[in-house]
């Protein structure tokens, strides 16, 4: 009797292990596993109300195409409304629509983003393309010493780090570009604005303002200068100072009446005036 019960318990254990979900539910656990196995993390971001998310779960995840495409990835599934990892990750990476799938490396640098539902084979091809582009990016990073004098490529690489949420990596490269005397003026100016943007995205608002103030001591005209003035308004807005943002956008409108950014500025002014109940002018 006892032997039979023991055999049944062992059999049940094997069944449970066989059907255990490969999907992790916490970022820390996924990071740990990715570091141990030197793998990318595939993140399925979903919400209970998202019909296409359920369709993806039912039709794409069980498919051979998906299983093969993610065979060497750590699988992480997060509810964007869980008030924990899912909510934080979707906020940090600016996820505004579902379903969205994010591929991360073990340091949570974005390897790629796929948006919307696709059938299994099509999705697998998109995922493979994303992985290929990430490998190309990493190759360019490893070859970075060879472009020491190619300032345009260095700026592009710093911008790509920013687009992949590698803000610290972007910031260090941009700081070098604005400090080197041989850097062309156009590249230097863009590097200043990108540096302030990167700092704003990290919520380092004081640092961003200081970067813009320093830039405006070396440049007082041109597209980058206009963007720096706009960015000042954005920094006010991101830091919760809507009044300061409105004042800055109005000042921009007065100083640059023919700017290519005028339409966007007018939209921001109108929106803030409605929000603050401020009189139009």
Image (cartoon, rainbow, N blue to C red):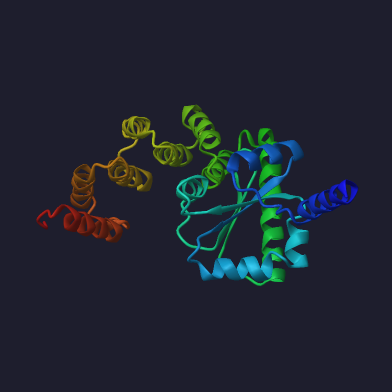
Q: Which sits in the foreground, 20 or 109?
A: 20
Percent of width and height locating residue 93: 49, 49
Percent of width and height locating residue 188: 46, 36
Q: Which sits in the foreground, 263 or 47?
A: 47
| Residue at left offset 84%, top offset 50% | 5
Left or right side of 277 for 218:
right
Q: Is residue 119 above or below residue 224?
A: below
Q: Which sits in the foreground, 110 or 70?
A: 70
Q: Is residue 108 above or below residue 214?
A: below
| Residue at left offset 28%, top offset 61% | 263
Q: Is residue 35 above or below residue 49?
A: above
| Residue at left offset 51%, top offset 43% | 162
Q: Residue furthest front?
A: 1
Left or right side of 157 for 129:
right
The quadrant holding residue 194 is top left
Using the rendered image of the protein, determine whether residue 44 is visible from the camera's viewpoint: yes
Q: Which sits in the foreground, 147 or 233?
A: 233
Instruction: Specify the quadrant that holds the C terminus.
Output: bottom left
| Residue at left offset 29%, top offset 43% | 229
Percent of width and height locating residue 267: 26, 60
Q: Residue furthest right?
A: 3
Give the total number of marks visible in the rendering: 0
Percent of width and height locating residue 255: 21, 48
Using the rendered image of the protein, determine whether residue 108 is visible from the camera's viewpoint: no
């Amino acid at each position: 009797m006892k032997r039979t019960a023991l055999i049944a318990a062992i059999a049940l254990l094997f069944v449970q292990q066989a059907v255990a979900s490969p999907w992790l539910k916490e970022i820390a656990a996924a990071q740990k596993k990715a570091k141990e196995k030197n793998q990318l993390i595939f993140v399925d971001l979903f919400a209970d109300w998202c019909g296409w998310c359920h369709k993806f779960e039912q039709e794409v995840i069980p498919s051979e195409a998906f299983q093969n495409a993610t065979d060497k990835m750590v699988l992480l599934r997060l509810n964007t409304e869980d008030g924990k990892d899912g909510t934080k990750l979707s906020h940090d990476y600016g996820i505004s629509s579902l379903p969205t799938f994010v591929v991360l490396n073990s340091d949570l640098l974005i390897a790629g983003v796929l948006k919307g539902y696709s059938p299994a084979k099509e999705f697998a091809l998109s995922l493979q393309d994303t992985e290929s582009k990430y490998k190309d990016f990493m190759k360019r990073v490893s070859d970075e010493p060879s472009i020491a004098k190619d300032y345009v490529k260095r700026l592009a690489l710093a911008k790509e780090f920013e687009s992949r949420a590698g803000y610290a990596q972007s910031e260090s490269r941009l700081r070098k570009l604005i400090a080197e005397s041989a850097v062309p003026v156009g590249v230097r100016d863009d590097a200043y604005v990108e540096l302030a943007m990167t700092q704003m995205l990290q919520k380092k608002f004081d640092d961003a303002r200081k970067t813009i103030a320093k830039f405006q001591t070396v440049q007082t005209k041109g597209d980058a200068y206009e963007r720096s003035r706009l960015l000042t308004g954005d920094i006010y807005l991101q830091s919760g100072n809507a009044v300061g943002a409105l004042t800055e956008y109005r000042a921009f409108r007065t100083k640059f009446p023919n700017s290519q950014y005028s339409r966007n500025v007018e939209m921001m002014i109108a929106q803030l005036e409605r929000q603050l109940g401020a009189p139009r002018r």
